Image: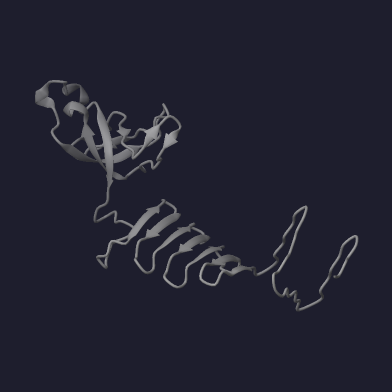
Amino acid sequence: MSYSEFTDDVDDAIRGVATAIVTDNEDPEGMARVKVRYPWRNEDEQSYWARVARTMAGGDRGTYFHPEVDDEVLVAFEQGNIHYPYVIGALWSSAERPPEDNADGNNDVRMIRSRSGHQITLNDNGTAGKVEITTNAGHSILLDDASGSEKIVVADKSGQNTVELDSTSGAINVSSGATVSVESKLIDIKGQGNVTVEAGGILTLKGSLVKIN
């Protein structure tokens, strides 16, 4: 059945919603629309451009999570008219499974995970809550609310270069597997108690004028 055989008559209205597969996500008009293929239509037939419902949308603002080609989506039709489709959600399936499965039944984890594996995880565990941002390469930012060990940790993929803010002890630790450099027009180092400068090799202090005490 071709599109021309569909009319705007109420008898041809599509009741409810339908599942579909995204076939095109490059909207020539830049409106972030997609085309889909319906399971009951011919394999080579695509829909009209379908607008995608977002959690927020406005001029140059909003939440932008665009469907991928081959994603399964849920489609609704304005007044039941197949010529006016709207993508209202995305679907997982037994073939395309979610990145988290709530195996423990606590439903603590909320997650955003991109195609390549960049990930934002929010864990609402009452005693071990945390927010973590990780890249596909393994770089990470951790905001850890675990009771008794609250901290913020920024780490590269090697794990050798880190900055840690320990909320429990009040300590700030900067660690590197190579060199730590600090550069500014003016640098002040002050300690209310003792200040220790230690080198495993030669300790060099250099300036146009070096004053001690």
Tell me: 163 left or right of 194.
left
**Which residue is pictured at 70% across the width and 66% down the height?**
179
> 179 or 182: nearer the eye?
182
**Which residue is pictured at 20% across the width and 21% down the height?**
4
Q: Is residue 45 visible?
A: no
Q: Which quadrant would residue 56 be assigned to in this image?
A: top left
Farthest-out residue, front: 192
Work out whether 195 lies above or below 130: below
Work out whether 5 lies above or below 56: above
> 178 or 105: nearer the eye?
105
Farthest-out residue, left: 11
> 114 or 131: nearer the eye?
131
In the picture, the quarter occupied by the C terminus is bottom right
**Which residue is pictured at 44% across the width and 53% down the height?**
116
Percent of width and height locating residue 10? 11, 23
In the picture, the quarter occupied by the N terminus is top left
Percent of width and height locating residue 107? 28, 61
Instruction: Report the number of discs.
Output: 0
Q: Which quadrant would residue 65 be assigned to in this image?
A: top left
**Which residue is pictured at 51% across the width and 71% down the height?**
168
Percent of width and height locating residue 110? 35, 56
Work out whether 150 lies above or below 122: below
Percent of width and height locating residue 81? 19, 26
Tell me: 143 left or right of 188.
left
> 194 or 20: nearer the eye?
194
